[in-house]
């Protein structure tokens, strides 16, 4: 074996070892973690702000999330969502709300009871009839073919909601692009984006890298138990990380692994803590938001001035048995969100943390067989936090008439009156993204007349 061949073999063996070492992590250590050097960050943001994205996978039914409560409005609702259809909410069960800018009352889904008082106290609001759009779109334009690609497909619409791109394929999400714009705000290089719901397009940036943390177990090398054998393995890994530095790719992989190991030493004790408001909550969404609360509580120790979080709750694809399924999911969501909001109040950062929902689409106003609904389009999103101009609707509520002016087809698929771009831009502006940078975060924003829906 010649020397060159021996060097290549050693490099390949080491690469394989590093790959396997990364796979040992409880959560992949960090998702492509690439911490920036301290020297690159002389500027520090003067204040703290956090965005918490809650993605409701499957398509939450907006038509039962908010229902007209006045006599004529509810009658219009009940004429289509009849009691016999199995998807009607009775008028008596709805939680009454009076949006400040709307003349008529509405009702929230009864499972949102923990959130209901926050709407009245001005800490929660709804962005109305938001969806993926290529441009402001009328029914005539929709019928002429102006529409997002693969409009009623779960995977495609999840991608478009997370990337704010409905005409071209994007490899980055708008959460990640916000992180790209704000990464210098964290002077010690702590990642702007943290996900408890896995690595998704939403958290993926062009230059920044998301941190992916578990809600259970430890964040670090699996098997690092402190025993002699485990310690020897860790020592061997650290030795390997210092070898073969002349190869740029191998050196970069080594740096990422070492940085992730170092980061786990800071994050593990944080995730091991307790959050009193979540003591009785055991659902996945509660555990994820509890982890987010721990990271926010440790913001000063981590040197984080700007943080974007991603959590997720699935199961909203309610083609059948919708009433029971949505009631359970919204109950999980509302309890977790209320515990999280109360925690931000206790931490003194309620006005610095804004939580918001995304979902790939709403459900048809017209019920389908099996007491369910089908895939639709525009829907309503909840925004929560001390900085929210709450107690109101932002956007135009659709006309609840099948084949009416807002129905894209015949089943009550509402054409959005506000775009993902406008919704996301409102959040990004509050977070600190300047007007000049918004065009790179939301490349399609210039096609819309509004860049700020006004709920923050």
Image (spheres, grey):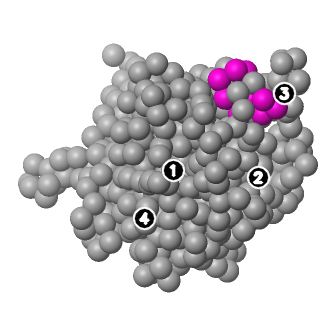
Closest to the observer: 113 or 269? Answer: 113
> Which numbered circle lies on residue 423?
none
For mark 1, what is the residue?
91
Q: Is residue 367 above or below residue 358?
A: above
| Residues at marks 4 and 2 touching, judged by CB atoms closer than 8 Å | no
Chain-order first, disc 4 or disc 2: 4
> Which numbered circle lies on residue 395?
2
| Residues at marks 4 and 3 touching, judged by CB atoms closer than 8 Å | no
Q: In whole angstroms, how far apart are the C-alphas of marks 4 and 3?
A: 37 Å
Q: Residue 307: which quarter of the image?
A: bottom right
Numbered label tally:
4
> Which numbered circle lies on residue 114?
4
Foreground label between 2 and 1: 1
Q: Residue 406: which quarter of the image?
A: top right
User: Alpha-carbon neighbours of circle 2 within 10 Å: few (<14), some, or many (≥20)?
Assistant: some
Residue stretch rendered in magenta on the structure: 404-414
Q: Quadrant of the C terminus?
A: bottom right
| Residues at marks 2 and 1 touching, judged by CB atoms closer than 8 Å | no
Q: In whole angstroms, how far apart are the C-alphas of marks 4 and 2?
A: 24 Å
Chain-order first, disc 4 or disc 3: 4
Foreground label between 4 and 1: 1
Measuring 68% from the left and 53% from the top, which residue is drawn there? 127
Q: Position of residue 255 (x, y in %)?
A: 46, 50
């Amino acid at each position: 074996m010649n020397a060159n061949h021996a060097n290549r073999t050693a490099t390949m063996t080491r690469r394989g070892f590093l790959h396997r070492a990364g796979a040992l992590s409880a959560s992949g250590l960090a998702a492509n973690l690439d911490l920036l050097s301290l020297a690159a960050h002389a500027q520090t943001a003067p204040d703290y702000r956090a965005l918490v994205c809650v993605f409701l996978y499957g398509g939450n039914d907006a038509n039962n999330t908010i229902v007209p409560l006045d006599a004529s409005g509810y009658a219009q609702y009940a004429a289509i969502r009849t009691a016999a259809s199995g998807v009607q909410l009775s008028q008596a069960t709805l939680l009454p709300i009076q949006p400040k800018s709307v003349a008529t009352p509405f009702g929230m889904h009864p499972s949102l009871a923990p959130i209901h008082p926050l709407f009245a106290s001005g800490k929660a609001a709804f962005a109305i009839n938001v969806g993926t759009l290529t441009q402001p779109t009328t029914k005539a334009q929709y019928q002429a073919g102006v529409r997002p690609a693969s409009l009623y497909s779960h995977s495609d619409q999840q991608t478009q909601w997370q990337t704010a791109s409905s005409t071209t394929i994007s490899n980055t999400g708008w959460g990640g692009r916000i992180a790209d714009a704000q990464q210098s705000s964290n002077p010690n290089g702590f990642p702007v984006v943290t996900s408890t719901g896995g690595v998704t397009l939403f958290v993926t940036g062009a230059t920044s890298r998301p941190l992916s943390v578990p809600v259970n177990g430890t964040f670090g090398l699996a098997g690092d138990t402190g025993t002699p054998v485990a310690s020897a393995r860790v020592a061997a890994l650290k030795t390997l990380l210092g070898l073969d530095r002349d190869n740029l790719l191998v050196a970069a992989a080594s740096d990422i692994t070492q940085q992730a190991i170092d980061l786990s030493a800071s994050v593990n004790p944080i995730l091991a803590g307790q959050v009193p408001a979540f003591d009785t909550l055991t659902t996945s969404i509660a555990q994820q938001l509890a982890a987010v609360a721990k990271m926010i509580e440790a913001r000063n120790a981590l040197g984080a001035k700007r943080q974007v979080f991603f959590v997720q709750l699935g199961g909203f694809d309610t083609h059948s048995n919708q009433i029971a399924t949505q009631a359970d999911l919204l109950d999980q969501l509302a309890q977790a969100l209320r515990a999280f909001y109360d925690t931000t109040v206790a931490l003194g950062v309620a006005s610095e943390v804004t939580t918001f929902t995304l979902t790939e689409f709403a459900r048809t106003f017209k019920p389908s067989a099996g007491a369910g609904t089908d895939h639709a389009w525009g829907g309503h999103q909840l925004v929560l936090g001390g900085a929210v101009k709450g107690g109101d609707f932002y956007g135009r509520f659709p006309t609840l008439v099948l084949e009416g002016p807002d129905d894209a087809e015949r089943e009550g698929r509402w054409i959005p009156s506000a775009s993902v771009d406008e919704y996301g831009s409102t959040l990004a502006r509050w977070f600190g993204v300047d007007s000049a940078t918004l065009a790179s975060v939301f490349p399609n924003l210039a096609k819309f007349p509004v860049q700020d829906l006004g709920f923050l």
